[in-house]
Amino acid sequence: MTVHTGKHFLQIPGPTNVPDRVLRAMDVPTIDHRGREFAQLGLEVLEGCKAVFRTKNPVVIYPSSGTGAWEAAIVNTLSPGDKVLMVETGHFATLWKGLAEKFKLDVEFLPGDWRRGAQPEEIGVRLADDRQHRIKAVMVVHNETSTGVTSRIPEIRRAIDRAKHPALFLVDTISSLGSIEYEHDAWGVDVTVCCSQKGLMLPPGLASMQYRRRLSPQQRPTRRAGPIGIGKRSSSRTRTVRGLTRLPPIFSTACAKRSRC
Ligand SMILES: Cc1ncc(COP(=O)(O)O)c(C=O)c1O
């Protein structure tokens, strides 16, 4: 039997330790997860999320791991066969690439040495070469948890704009949001993918997404890249307007999230 002689302190890249203030916020009696009180909590959390994502637009939350958030981002914006540009910044970028391939996306993976972030110049050159606009999305991990390397998101946005390319810009902020400067609106990101247990220092299990704008007809998926049970953009949005989530919400994590907003 393991005997803990003090407070357990988890020392792995994630989940991170949850601050005491957040732990205390979860110490509340359970309420009806389909009831009015939960909806009130949901609305408060969703409003607070805007400040965390640094956006004026609604944020979507739903129960999932970070991997589920990756899936939702793909399924809601891309079709099988779509070409996407991803960058090898480390372990998590490589995992996201593998997942994109499972959804039958045609991934071009810019090679990296795991010592530096995505290079805006390389992305810009590749997009400028793509005169027929076959690349539908640029997908980058903001902070590579495996190496601690952070990519320069605003510079990548500028490279996309300089190339006058319509590709969507998808950014994984799972270990950055809440811990490293991030500006969804000001940096012109189209989809920000996040989850509770790393940068936000909450317990695992609550994904959050921000979609910047309506997709243009050219950017809209023709056939979705997979089933859309988890994180379906339209129905998640409709429900979250009312403060509820589509799948059973994680009540304690929502309380924790409220304490961080
Ligand atoms: C940057 C990044 N992306 C994605 C993931 C995947 O998240 P999860 O393990 O919750 O599926 C993690 C964490 O493991 C991560 O650090």
Image (cartoon, rainbow, N blue to C red):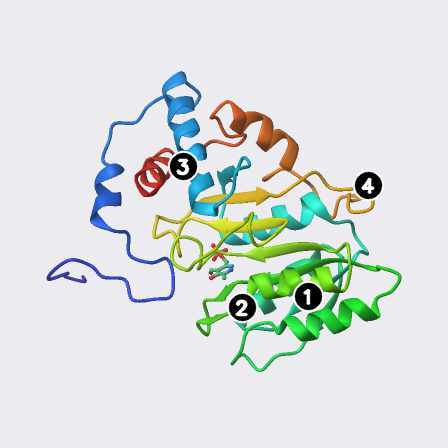
Q: Residue at x 43, y 58 (%)?
A: 181
Crowd class of label 3 (few under 14; some 14 to 19; many from 20; radius 10 Å):
some
Q: Of the two numbered discs 1 and 2 on the same chain, state the one appearing first in sequence.
A: 2
In the picture as drawn, the residue positioned furthest to the top comes out as: 36
Q: Position of residue 220 (x, y in %)?
A: 78, 43
In the picture as drawn, the residue positioned furthest to the right comes out as: 132
Which amino acid type corresponds to the residue marked 1 in the rendered image? Ala
Which amino acid type corresponds to the residue marked 2 in the rendered image? Ser
Relative vertical location of residue 145 with respect to residue 235 in this rendering, above or below: below
Q: Residue at x 50, y 38 (%)?
A: 61
Q: Of the two numbered discs 4 and 2 on the same chain, state the one appearing first in sequence.
A: 2
Q: Residue at x 65, y 64 (%)?
A: 97
Residue under label 1, please give it. 159
Residue 98 makes an appearance in the image: no
Q: Position of residue 70 (x, y in %)?
A: 59, 53
* Disc 2 secondary structure class: loop
Residue under label 3, please give it. 48
The residues tagged by marks 4 and 2 sit, at their Cα atoms, a distance apart of 29 Å
Residue under label 4, please give it. 217
The residues tagged by marks 3 and 4 sit, at their Cα atoms, a distance apart of 31 Å
Would you identify the image quadrant in which residue 100 lies?
bottom right
Q: Position of residue 135 (x, y in %)?
A: 79, 60
* Disc 3 secondary structure class: helix
Which amino acid type corresponds to the residue marked 4 in the rendered image? Pro
